[in-house]
Amino acid sequence: MSSGKEENTLTLFVNGKKVTETHADPETMLLSFLREKLRLTGTKYGCGGGGCGACTVMVSHYQPATKTITHYSANACLLPLCQLHGAAVTTVEGIGSTKTRIHPVQERIAKAHGSQCGFCTPGMVMSMYALLRNKPHPAMDDITQALAGNLCRCTGYRPIVDGCRTFCQEANCCQANRDGNCCLNEKESGDEPDHGKPQLFDKSQFLPLDPTQELIFPPELILMAEKASPQTLSFRGERMTWVSPVSLEELVQLKTSNPKAPLVLGNTNIGPDIKFKGVLHPLIISPTRVTELFEVAQMPEGVSVGAGCSLSEVLSLLEKLVHQFPEEKTELFRALIQQLENLGSQQIRNVASLGGHIMSVYPNSDLNPLLAAGNCKVIVISSGGRRDVPLNQDFFVSFGKTILKPDEIVMSVFIPFSRKGEFVRAFRQAPRKESAFATVTTGMRVLFSAGSRLVEDVSIYYGGLGAITVSAAKTCTAIVTRPWDDETLSRAYDVLLDELVLPPAAPGGKVEFRRSLALSFLFKFNLEVLQKLRDINVITDELPEKIQPLPREIRPSLQEFQHVSEGQNEQDPVGRPIMHRSAISQATGEAVYCDDLPKTDGELFLTLVTSSRAHAKIIRVDVSEALQLPGVVDVITAKDIPGKKVRAMFGYDEELLAQTEVSCIGQMICAVVADTRAHAKRGAAAVKITYEDLPEPVFTIEEAIEKSSFFEPLRTIKKGNVTDAFKTVDQVYEGEIRLGGQEHFYMETQSMLVVPVGEETEFNVYVSTQWPTLAQDAVAETLGIPSNRVTCHVKRIGGAFGGKVTKTSILASITSVAAWKTNRAVRCILERGDDMLITGARHPVLGKYKVGFMNDGRIVAADMQYYANAGNTVDESVLVVEKILLHMDNAYNIPNLRGRAAACRTNLPSNTAFRGFGVPQTGMVVENMVNDVAMVLERPADQIREINMYKGPSVTHYKFEFSPENMHRCWEECKAKSDYDARRTAIDQFNQQNRWKKRGMSIIPIKYGIAFAESFLNQAAALVHIYKDGSVLVTHGGTEMGQGIHTKMQQVASRELHIPPSKIYISETSTNTVPNTCPSAASFGTDANGMAVKNACQTLYQRLEPIRQKDPKGSWESWVRAAFFEKISLSATGFYRGPDLYMDWEKMEGQPYAYFTYGVCCCEVELDCLTGDYRTVRTDIVVDIGKSVNPSVDIGQIEGAFMQGLGLFTLEELKFSPSGLLYTRGPSQYKIPAVCDVPLRFNVYLLSDSHNPHAIYSSKGIGEPILFLGSSVFFAIKDAAAAARSESGLVGPFSLDSPATAERACLACASPFTKKIPASKPGSFKPWALNI
């Protein structure tokens, strides 16, 4: 091999500039190269595994053979730098900036309000940009496909899709089209006409897309590619060598002498292995320039596709062939297209190769079962020559292993044409519809004797039912030579069940579901085959229903809000839908987040070492090996902490770094500091810790109850007399529901940078936190220095949702110890997997209830018990269970009510605050109880809800008086806007006509208390400076995390000072400008800080009054100048005490909230009863938020919270191993909602003419309340499942736990196939995952 040669120089172009790298390390990915070497920080790190799209860039290549240039989007975190020799890379900075001109994609995403925290925006922009480079006039389908691999946790996607939709120009872009104008401004027929309703944005103002203005492909790269004799490239790094051969011959030689060296094309399989599993390959072979691997040849019996072709290229090739050949020849091609469209994301398909996919032999591969069923074969080459190897059951040997020899290389894949009378189908079911590994996949092929229903040949393969792709050979034997009819198939189902057995503890879990999917898919194949046989007139029988796919077209939606009042000054921005103040710089990548701050000289990187045991004594920590590794500077342990080694909360201490004992997997023990990220990570892996396990760890709520493992105090609240009331009721029902936890999945992981100033123990702390003051206090106490030496700076946060408060201050404390000890700047940016492991999640809850009610539907008594799984430390769990009890009534006036709640202490990572803070959990339990009452009485659930709602002047169970009038207005308006009654009838009709698909609908209210029950947390302060040129600088205590608080503060200052917002700037939140601030949380940020900013601005405006009277015609600038010369102070602080709230748990009464925000949501879903897959067809939300300060920001909060709730209640599952290890540590295992989960019609209406005397400008807090309304999707799924159960004769209440994943929904439907699966006896095996 060519390791003896000198190293080559790597040449690529980035944003039109030439970049040469003489020492390219094979382990360097494009992302770190862009961010660290080139200082292009617009491209973000979100997960490191190609699962979130935050690092999307566009790559362009010149193809000398065809003399064309190809552009495609790709994940920079998986692209090896060495692979990009001769490529042109375009990043978000390269397409436009505020300094030059912004690109239309950047402008439209920003102005359509598609950027909240902004961390995902550069990736969204680049996915869309790459699409427009290839298709300047995309269809709506192209857009949703391009964005499928980009996650956003803030917006709910609707505004992003709407912004991108403005590029659609085709006539059928949507139903409601009349004049070539796109659908955004028009209403569907059936909606009321548009009477000059205000719009969130005006698309007539957008810059047009001009393809001639894009960067050209560098001519130098064309010359380089055209050059006759390419040479072998080799790059050597610290631990790996990378060789890129130029001929097939050389490739075969390399592989013969290095059979263990992997071939890397897309790096979508080897990359994550190296990154997450620590696999090390001394040599990597990159065959990207071996032309034979990319050749496509058509033959009489099929097509041969080069193994190096990317999945996107295979997809477009097959699409071309389907148009060229008659339908009967392309059965297999069409099935492959269907699978390819759902495989990975656009970014992954653009780089992953066909050969790589086959040879990775994933157990749940999407293509392998289909290629095997379709009689495909691979052509392999080695030093021994070529051979054809059929893809059949012998090909797949064992997990990750095929029949091929180590030195054999797959050259091409042969895909045959189908024959007359042959049908091929593929099915898959995955945890999320797009960009998700499949749970079960299958390829099925059947060949009939000419003109009959006799089966000549049949082939069925499954993925996801074992360690390899499996053939259902016995099932095929039971079908072949027999007629295709009910008798043959019902025998086949039984054979299949016996043939494909999964042990109950199989990796991946979901055993019953996976086995029932195997049967359901065969049944679906049967329905499709019967339909085909009927189409070609082989049979004339009446058919069972034809299963249409679920609907998927995203329709235009409505966002209704009120115009500002007619008399309002044009300059006054309050109440107008103003764009997020930094949306444009977020879309251009210029917005600076914590990790985008430039490196300082001598800066170190910190990586944490965490416990691998759930409950154990630490015997010793051996750091000797770590300290000898290159680049490692020091290891920080608890002994190094100069000040307090613990953080106290509610009378419990939490250690910063564990010393003698660990109480969960993921607890921090020590930290390694090194000169680079990679060195710190390797150092952390080299720390050896010896443990001695302690007996009986506690993981589940049941175990905690059994051992009375609780955090004190346990809380109780009651009104009326529950015991007596139960004696007077007509019926009593007892039930329970479990809710899983939820990972915050903020796009920006925990990030901090601590910089020692160098004198008098002063530190600057740049940290992504919701509560800068807490981080300041924590660092000061940890270092044993006064708070006046520590300044915390927060510019902006890439999403937080409650997860950047308590743990962030602990991480900042540990990082500050490293900075103090080394006297150098220390940066700590958690990798996604560590972030998910360490920082905890929303509390899983078990809710039990006993409810007494009358036959007319009135609920007279309810006794509720809540158990929250708090994890290993108290954190904010006690406050969470208190809030659970305070909201246990939701919207219902239950005269006799008792609630008890406990925070269970377990050996899992500590759970923490999360948007909604216990309310989504308690709301779910009470709504499920109301639902059960409706099912027992066999009455519509919405009627039972109406009967029991608060009416007239009301008092809560903690004796707080309020008026529910606006809640009723929301309820009535939601029923009217959603056309509830007519659609309910239509759904019942649909369900009568469809056996295997059902629709369901639900309408759910929320009453959410705003502000902190801990009164001191409601205060806020602000500092406002007016400079001599008239510009204004505002600082306040709130942090900007995407919720638009800075934008709203700018609006407040603009109104109070009577100047345009353009004169007002907000730079950051810092503890040296506004001290002793409270957290940005509890939906109270705008309420508190808005009043403080208003107070400061009013003070300043009054000071200028004498000047204005002297010169009433003067300009703002002239008044400010005059004030300076008259020695009038142009700086003022503002302060707001906040409401005096309290809760007395002894007396069980208080006023813990300032007021309530109300909302009602109606959702309709369509459910596939055979697979549990569902689509939210339509959502209508009506919310009372008083008078909105900024409708676009508030509607963004509503949509984002709803989608996060949809994730919580239907999609997101945290899985722990039996030993307490979190399995779901990244986007490939943990699925948050993506574009494919947005309701197809998503309407939001702000209640008109509402006032709220308790908050600034009569507005209301909106950050959290709507998250719970995501449960309306859950109850719609439950409604659809109930319709499916009634087909099997099952009526009455049934249990469905949250989240209602495809697995739970499918099993709840109780189809004949799920009933065939024998249930495993609990206790007879160790399950793959715990039910916490």
Image (cartoon, helix red, strand yellow):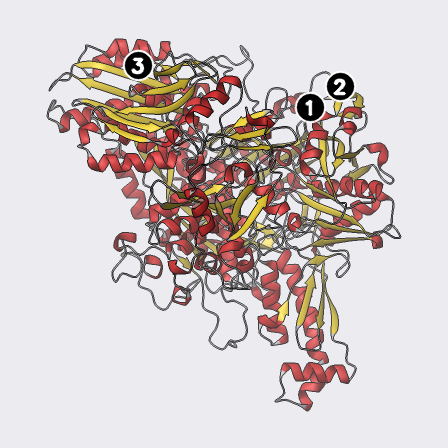
**Residue 1236 pos. (x, y %):** 41, 41
Q: Nearer the viewer, residue 111 or 1330?
A: 111
Q: Amino acid at mark 3?
A: Tyr
Image quadrant assignment for residue 1128: bottom right
Q: Nearer the viewer, mark 1 or mark 3?
A: 1
Q: Nearer the viewer, residue 403 or 1287?
A: 403
**Residue 857 pos. (x, y %):** 43, 39
Q: Nearer the viewer, residue 652 or 390?
A: 390
Q: Is residue 1206 visible?
A: yes
Residue holding disc 3? 493
Mark 2 → mark 3, Cα distance in angstroms: 50 Å
Q: Residues within 10 Å of mark 1 (few under 14, many from 20)?
A: some
**Is 713 above or below relative to 1318?**
below
Q: Earlier in the sequence, mark 2 or mark 3?
A: 3
**Residue 955 pos. (x, y %):** 58, 51
Q: Earlier in the sequence, mark 1 or mark 3?
A: 3
Tell me if 1088 is positioned left or right of 204 in this view: right
Q: Which residue is painted at 34% across and 24% down in the image?
A: 413
Q: Amino acid at mark 2?
A: Tyr
Q: Residues within 10 Å of mark 2 (few under 14, many from 20)?
A: some
Residue holding disc 1? 612
Residue holding disc 2? 691
Mark 1 → mark 3, Cα distance in angstroms: 44 Å
Image quadrant assignment for residue 515: top left
Q: Which residue is painted at 53% across and 56% down in the image?
A: 588
Tell me if 1249 is positioned left or right of 40 in this view: left
- Provide the secondary structure element on which disc 1 rests: loop
